[in-house]
Amino acid sequence: MPNNDRSVVVLISGNGSNLQALIEQSTSDNYKIVGVISNKANAYGLKRAEQNHIPSTVLDHREYESRDLFDQALAEAIDSFSPSLIVLAGFMRILGTQFVERYQGRILNIHPSLLPDYPGINTHQRVLDAGEKRHGVSVHFVTGKLDGGPVIAQVPIDIESTDTADTLANKIHKKEHIIYPAVVSWFVDGRLSMDANDIAYLDGEALSASGTNLATT
Ligand code: GRF
């Protein structure tokens, strides 16, 4: 059992702007980031952790012979922090089924699209190439299906004719930095859960396929 119901571990691979937003919005009343784990030694997010006196661990996936072995080491690193919640924030590794089942209902991910549309990578360019008028961001529970777990919250944005993949990435990041700390707070407050059938609940109500619309400006 976790030592502290409000403790959160954040997994990153890169810049960590979502980690930064989570750090800035963490207060003694909501969640506490007890550790950061990166699969890249040069991830800028590790500096953010250091600057905020958050312990961090690097696990380079290339040093493991198989996904299972990496997942086992990752689970050990996570368990050393005894978190109640695992928050994927730009963590660019696919997690195996056993790993996901071990932490069932305790892993969140943020994805830059309006899921179930555009799972996977390069979402900004793909929505532009498809001529979409709307894009957005989703926070969801992690299940064995890539970017396929139940959606908890989304924020849509309009795509303008001048948008590029870079401008969309900037707009989406701004929304991410609002939506992710909010959802993490819901979880540690006990308002959010996922059942064995992969249905997500907020305040006891089953969430719809698009979750809650958190259209904050
Ligand atoms: C975000 O766009 C997130 O949606 C995706 O990876 C990106 C991470 O950005 N999963 P950052 O490292 O938090 O700046």
Image (spheres, grey):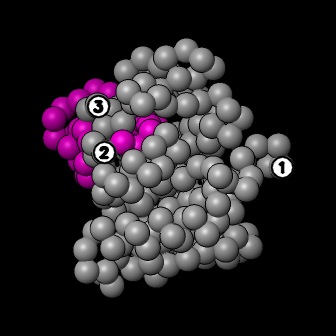
Observer-nearest of 184 and 1: 1
- Disc 2 secondary structure class: loop
Q: Residue at x 34, y 55 (%)?
A: 98
Query: Residue 64 at x, y = what percent?
Result: 31, 80
In the image as oriented, which residue stretches furthest toward the bottom? 63
Label 3 is placed on what type of residue?
Pro
Picture disc at residue 116: 3
- Magenta segment includes 128: yes
Which callout, 1 or 2, points at the residue further toward the start of the chain? Answer: 1
In the image as oriented, which residue stretches furthest toward the right? 28
Query: Residue 120 at x, y = what percent?
Result: 25, 48
Relative side of 155 to 21, left or right: left
Which callout, 2 or 3, points at the residue further toward the start of the chain? Answer: 3
Circle 1 sits on which residue?
A: 28
- Disc 3 secondary structure class: loop
Crowding around mark 1 (Cα neighbors within 10 Å: few <14, some 14 to 19, many 20+) is few
Q: Quadrant of residue 110?
A: top left
The CA distance from mark 1 to mark 2 is: 32 Å
**In the figure, 208 relative to 194: above or below?**
above
Query: Residue 190 at x, y = what percent?
Result: 68, 32
Q: Are marks 1 and 3 in contact (CB under 8 Å)?
A: no
Q: Is mark 1 within 8 Å of ligand 1?
A: no
Circle 2 sits on which residue?
A: 144
Stretch in magenta:
118-143
Whether residue 14 is visible to the viewer of this picture, yes or no, is no
For discs 2 and 3, the disc positioned in front in the rendered view: 2
Label 1 is placed on what type of residue?
Ser
- Magenta segment includes 105: no
